[in-house]
Amino acid sequence: MPLFLCGIKDPLHWAFLSPSSQIVAWSMAVLSTLATVGTPLAQQSETLNTFSVSSGSPFGASGTMFLSQFANPALLGSLYLTPQWPMTGYYPIFPGSLPEAFPREGVSVGPLRLHPHMGVAQMYTDNVFRTNGNKTSDFLTTLSPGIQAQLPFGGLHSFLIDYRTNLQYYSRTTSNDVQDQSAVGAVKFNFPGGLKIDLQGEHRLGHDPRGSAVDNVNTQRLGVNKWTADGFTGHAEYFGAQSSVGLHVQTLRWQYLNNNQGAVRDRLINRANLLFSRDVTDNMSLRAMVGAQQSIYDQNKNLDNVIYTFSGGATWNISEMTSGDILVGYQHVQFTRAQVSQPPPLDRFFRDKNTYSNLFVMGRLNWQATPLLRLSLQLYRTIQQTVSIGSLFYTATGVNLTARHELTDRMTVNINFGYEHDKFQGVSSAGVTSGPDRNEDLKNIAVGVNYQAVKWVGVGAQYMFEDRRSTQAQFTYQANTVMLFAETLF
């Protein structure tokens, strides 16, 4: 039976396209057709989604093994080759993040609200392996179907299920293909008197991105490292008249699936943080935080450690247009086991001392410069754990600047600038240094535009430039990436 979709009578007219491009063309056509249908299902007026890939939460100070979760959201999106979807924002890369309920009517089934969504993107990058030499360019297709279900109960409480995918298919370098999935179930309690409790269980299938400083994957052009993460997160906070106290606990089980990474990196992470806040004026609150993150490795026992974080700071509303918050403190890394000889490949990882320390900083400044222009500045300095040969930790120090300008009621321009300096902690054995010191500077810029065709269909385009300079040449690279994407959300 012939198909009549957006004026194209049958698939033979698309025979000149590659299989992945045909998928994009069909998906784009479906979205375009949906956009022309009459009254949208969701009747609420909304602005385009600007969810960040990382909230910069003070809870926890370690992202993946090779990438700070506080880095520029656009950089993370570029490395993972996932766009800032117009409706749902970036795909949730890091385990442990609490999903936000979509503020829409959605599709109602009694008290249950369903929010199906579908994104499709076509991308091009001129350095798919993020290498210093022998660059390889490639086109890829990203499909992102998902659904969120919301069920209120007991007045102010709610139950939420959130399922998302990040399916990537490359034209030339199929070793990069991934089928990331994220399934989250969460219960949110909002009790009278100021007590809020969020409980979440999750399962994720993910991968390490190219350009994330993995020792052998990029240089030997292996398939990307893939992993699963299963976890539980709980957050409780009590708000009094002038004070609040919060407790955040989390446990995550990481298991690596390929490239012989399991013996080195499979681990259990336990995290607990206490946050105290006290209002000192109508516009200013003082804050204090203490936390600990424990890493227990299945086999690589020389890396078992606890990271302790102690910090204090403030939040303030300087004016109706300007607000900010900052935490400054101290991080201390304590290895929990005596170092022993390990069999290959674990014999490559050793340390020259049992403790490390670092200045911890996390701050934001938000400024509504005009009714249509919003600027956000983020500063951070934190310890990140790695398993690179010759280094067990690095200190990430960075700054991000984001500008969001509403050109019209339907069109928004987003600009991101990011800079991060990574100083790797070298190790030595019997007085012999394992290798030259490693320091890296990461600079990146992204420019994008989102257009909301109707209330439940959005399209966009984004360009990103990455520049990584390392004292070890194999980690130096530059990359340009262009994305075209569309998404529908009910």
Image (cartoon, rainbow, N blue to C red):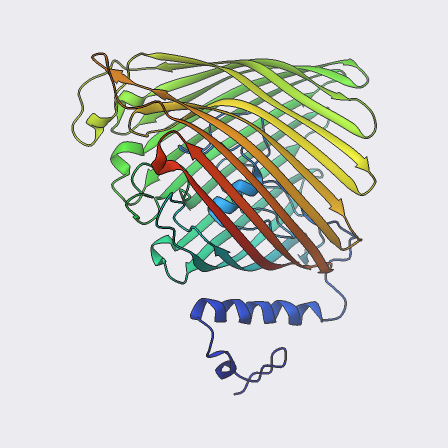
Residue 50 visible in the current orientation: no
Quarter of the picture containing the C terminus is bottom right
Count of labels in the image: 0
Relative to residue 339, is residue 249 depicted above or below? below
Residue drawn 65% across the image and 28% down it: 196
Residue 215 visible in the current orientation: yes
From the top left corner, tell me how far across and down residue 385 is, in percent: 40, 26
Q: Nearer the viewer, residue 139 or 86?
A: 139
Judged from this view, the residue extending furthest toward the bottom is 1
Q: Nearer the viewer, residue 188 or 176?
A: 176
From the top left corner, tell me how far across and down residue 171 is, in percent: 40, 63
Relative to residue 28, is residue 371 depicted above or below? above
Q: Give the side of residue 314 with respect to residue 241, left or right.
A: left
From the top left corner, tell me how far across and down residue 431 is, in percent: 23, 12
Q: Give the side of residue 136 with respect to residue 317, left or right.
A: left
Q: Give the side of residue 420 with respect to residue 113, left or right.
A: left
Residue drawn 47% across the image and 47% down it: 479
Q: Give the side of residue 228 with respect to residue 363, left or right.
A: left
Residue 372: image quadrant is top right
Residue drawn 61% across the image and 18% down it: 327
From the top left corner, tell me how far across and down residue 78 is, in percent: 51, 46
Residue drawn 20% across the image and 26% down it: 347
